[in-house]
Image: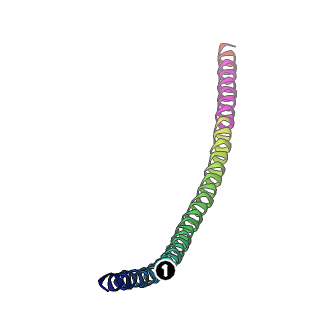
Amino acid sequence: MWRREQGNHGSLVKNTNEEVDAASNGQHENNRNTLEKSSEDVNAVVKKEEQNMESAILGIIQLQMKEIQEKIVRFEEFDLQMEKEWEQMERMKSLLFSDQLNLLFHRDAVLRTEDRKRETIKTDVAQ
């Protein structure tokens, strides 16, 4: 009888082990499902954060590009103004040169006229 009970006891232990294994497998499956769900949730949060970060960076880049474009426009306006002023300076330089030439020619003409008058006066006085 002892052996019979022992045999029953062995099957009882075996049945208990199988139940524990089944429960353990169910628990592992639940844990795996929970981990997979958590992983999906974390991935969704990470993806959303990446999208927010990309959007923020894009906004910053667009703002900086706008500022650079405005600076380029101001620089082009300044460059155009400088070019106009340069052209005006060149015209004034040409006018100044022209005035200096006219002054030289008139001065020489005046000096020659004065020399002729003196010669005429000397000739008249000598006669």
Seen in the image, is 39 located left or right of residue 97? left
Looking at the image, which residue sits at the far front?
A: 1
Look at the image and give the residue range highlighted in magenta.
Answer: 98-119
Does the magenta run of residues contain 21? no
The number of callouts visible is 1
Residue ID at (54%, 64%)? 64
Camera-side residue of 62 and 96:
62
34 versus 59 height, above or below: below
In the image, residue 102 lies in the stretch drawn in magenta: yes
Q: Looking at numbered disc 1 in the image, what kind of residue is underneath it?
A: Glu
Q: Quadrant of residue 71?
A: bottom right
| Residue 21 against residue 73 in the figure, above or below | below
Where residue 15 appears, as percent x and y from the top left, is 42, 84
Q: Position of residue 78 (x, y in %)?
A: 59, 55
Q: Is residue 76 above or below residue 63?
A: above
Q: Residue furthest top?
A: 126
Residue 117 sits in quarter: top right
Front-most of residues 5 and 105: 5
Residue at image x 66%, y 41%? Answer: 90
Classify the position of the N terminus by image quarter. Answer: bottom left
Main SS of the magenta part reads helix
Residue underneath mark 1: 29
What SS does tag 1 mark? helix
Pick whichever, 22 or 47, lies toward us: 22
Quadrant holding the C terminus: top right
Please provide percent x and percent y for residue 62.
Answer: 58, 67
